[in-house]
Structure formats: C-alpha cells, structure tokens
Amino acid sequence: MEWINFALIAAALYLLGLAGYRLVLALRALTNEVSFTTEKLNGFGADDFVLEPAKPSSTGDLAKLLSERRSMQRLKAREREERQRRLRARISSIDIDRR
C-alpha cells in the first residue's frame, strides 16, 4: 500500500514537472517573440511619416466629382432595385403547395 502511494505521488510530481517544463518553454518562446516585435516596432519612428498639407480643390473638380457621385448613386440604386426584383421573382416562383 505504501508503494502505491509513493508511485502515485511520484507520477503526480513527474507530470507536474512536465507541465512546468512546457510552461517554461512556452514562456521562453513568448519572450523571444515579444523581443522580436519590440525591435520591429522600435524601428518605426515619427520621422517616417510625412504629413502633407491639405490642398484646396478647384470648382471645376467639384462639378466633376459631384457628377461622378450622382452617377455612382444612380448605379447603386439601380443595383438595389435589381436585387429586389430578383428576390421578388424568386419568392413568387416558390410553389407553396408542393410541401
């Protein structure tokens, strides 16, 4: 009976040691990844980004942009209507009495 208790305790300690070892390996890999990413992030600086001042748009560009916007809105509305039409056609073609 004493040998069984000893074997169970030894097995439990062995499994606990294995779990601890795997935890240490995982922490070591995590620290390597963290150091790698911090090195990469430290490479980015405020000097890398260049902000350009905003440029005013001319009135000729405004008319062109507004006409393109209206045409895109019309196209989206047409596509929306086509989707609804196809959905209505699909729903109307369902045979309810077939069940």
Image: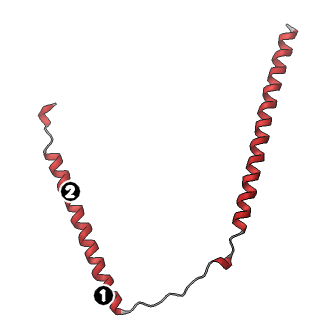
Q: Residue at x 86, y 15 (%)?
A: 6
Q: Farthest top residue?
A: 1
Residue under numbered circle 2: 84
Residue 91: percent from left, percent from top: 17, 46
The kind of secondary structure element at disc 1 is helix
Please tell me whether residue 59 is drawn above or below residue 47 in the rendered image: below
Q: Quadrant of residue 71?
A: bottom left
Q: Residue at x 76, y 37 (%)?
A: 22
Numbered disc total? 2
Please tell me whether residue 13 is drawn above or below residue 88 in the rendered image: above
Separation of marks 2 and 1 at Cα, in angstroms:
32 Å
Mark 2 is on which residue type? Gln
Mark 1 is on which residue type? Ala
Eye-nearest disc, 2 or 1: 1
Q: Quadrant of residue 80?
A: bottom left
Q: Residue at x 54, y 87 (%)?
A: 53
- Residues packed near mark 1 inside 10 Å, few (<14), some (14 to 19) or many (20 plus): few
Q: Residue 53 shows which numbered tag?
A: none
Q: Residue at x 13, y 38 (%)?
A: 95
Q: Is residue 1 left or right of residue 68?
A: right
Q: Quadrant of the C terminus?
A: top left
Residue under numbered circle 1: 63
Residue 70: percent from left, percent from top: 27, 77
The kind of secondary structure element at disc 2 is helix
